[in-house]
């Protein structure tokens, strides 16, 4: 946050996430998918475009947990299929 | 002497004969609202002046009260103005979540997003990003991970907020899902992965002010939460 009292300069406004908070993976059920995704990133020099399949797999793993029946985030998951 | 019995402002003309008497009469103090002039011609003029003075005083007082009222009214009016025109970084209507499926990535603009993690001094967590940077293009959704570990032997509740540098790029940084602004509880010795699912708005590529921006830094800070508090979500309500 900007601490200087700058009148007229734009200050940062944090916004809440669009689909809400991610319920955390406290039991580590999707850890394998996460490791695969991070390995893919490291191999491809941290380029996101080349690792979209792995991120889709991770998100699918999180979505199929019984406590996350979130239809609206399934729609955003479809964006990864492009 | 009889002079000493008079009030001080009436002792002036004593003992000076006729002239002294006139001087004393002239310098006698009158109560303040009596007109100064004794002459009937100048008395009317003085009354006119007094009336005009009173009118001017009324106008000036009304202007002062008006200014104070305007300064109180400015706050909601400015807020309305900002929301309609979208100035000052407030969210512009049009960031609909439906566009996530239909947005087209702008492939020729590669942006490096670096990650930073901070922790408040009273919160003894190990909080760090799991990748130092990631290269994205506007319009493409991306996933990033942070990791937090609670090395203490008591459950701790934390809550986080984030910051995007440069500030002006923050309005294009949309998070679909993340772990911020909600209380996250970590049991003793628990380590958890914290994902962020985000994208940069395709309009970023069309903004002339963002033409030189190639690096965006996303910084998360965790604070300790006293359980049970419901924090207001940032933004105007």
Image (tube, coloured by chain):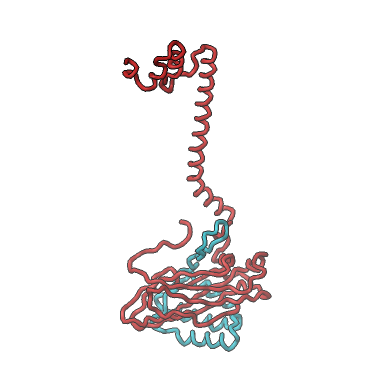
Chain colours: A cyan, B red
Residue B209 point in image, percent of width and height: 65, 64
Q: Is residue B36 visible?
A: yes
Q: Is residue A3 above or below residue A22?
A: above
Residue A76 versus residue A45: which sits nearer the camera?
A: A45
Relative to residue B232, is residue A36 drawn left or right?
Answer: right
Q: Locate residue A40: give its quadrant.
A: bottom right
Residue B126 point in image, percent of width and height: 42, 81
Residue A56 versus residue B113: which sits nearer the camera?
A: B113
Relative to residue B108, is residue B123 drawn left or right?
Answer: left
Q: Is residue B73 above or below residue A64?
A: above
Q: Locate residue B41: give its quadrant.
A: top right
Q: Is residue B92 visible?
A: no
Q: Locate residue B155: give its quadrant.
A: bottom left
Residue B90 point in image, percent of width and height: 54, 59
Q: Is residue B47 above or below residue A65?
A: above
The residue that appears at 52% across and 70% down in the rendered structure is B175
Q: Quadrant of the N terminus of chain B?
A: top left
The residue that appears at 67% across and 64% down in the rendered structure is B208
Q: Is residue B21 above or below residue B146?
A: above
Residue B215 versus residue B139: which sits nearer the camera?
A: B215
The residue that appears at 46% across and 62% down in the rendered structure is B234
Residue B139 point in image, percent of width and height: 61, 72
Tell how many labels: 0
């Amino acid at each position: 946050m900007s601490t200087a009292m700058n009148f007229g300069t734009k200050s940062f406004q944090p916004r809440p996430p669009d689909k809400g908070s991610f319920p955390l993976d406290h039991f580590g059920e999707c850890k394998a998918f996460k490791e695969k995704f991070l390995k893919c990133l490291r191999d491809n020099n941290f380029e996101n475009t080349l690792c979209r399949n792995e991120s889709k797999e991770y998100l699918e793993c999180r979505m199929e947990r019984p406590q996350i029946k979130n239809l609206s985030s399934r729609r955003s998951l479809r964006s990864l299929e492009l | 002497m009889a002079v000493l019995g008079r009030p001080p402002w009436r002792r002036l003309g004593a003992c000076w004969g006729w002239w002294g008497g006139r001087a004393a009469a002239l310098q006698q103090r009158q109560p303040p609202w009596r007109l100064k002039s004794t002459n009937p011609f100048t008395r009317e003029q003085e009354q006119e002046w007094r009336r005009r003075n009173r009118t001017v005083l009324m106008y000036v007082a009304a202007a002062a009260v008006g200014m104070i009222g305007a300064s109180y009214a400015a706050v909601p009016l400015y807020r309305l103005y900002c929301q309609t025109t979208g100035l000052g970084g407030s969210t512009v209507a049009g960031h609909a979540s439906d566009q996530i499926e239909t947005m087209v990535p702008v492939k020729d603009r590669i942006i490096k997003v670096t990650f930073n993690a901070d922790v408040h001094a009273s919160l003894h967590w190990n909080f760090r990003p799991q990748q130092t940077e990631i290269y994205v293009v506007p319009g493409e959704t991306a996933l990033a991970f942070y990791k937090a570990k609670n090395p203490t032997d008591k459950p701790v509740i934390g809550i986080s907020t984030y910051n995007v540098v440069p500030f002006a790029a923050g309005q294009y940084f949309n998070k679909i899902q993340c772990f911020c602004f909600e209380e996250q509880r970590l049991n003793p010795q628990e380590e958890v992965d914290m994902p962020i699912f985000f994208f940069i708005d395709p309009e970023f590529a069309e903004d002339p002010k963002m033409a030189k921006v190639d690096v965006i830094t996303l910084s998360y800070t965790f604070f300790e939460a006293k359980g049970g508090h419901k924090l207001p979500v940032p933004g105007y309500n």
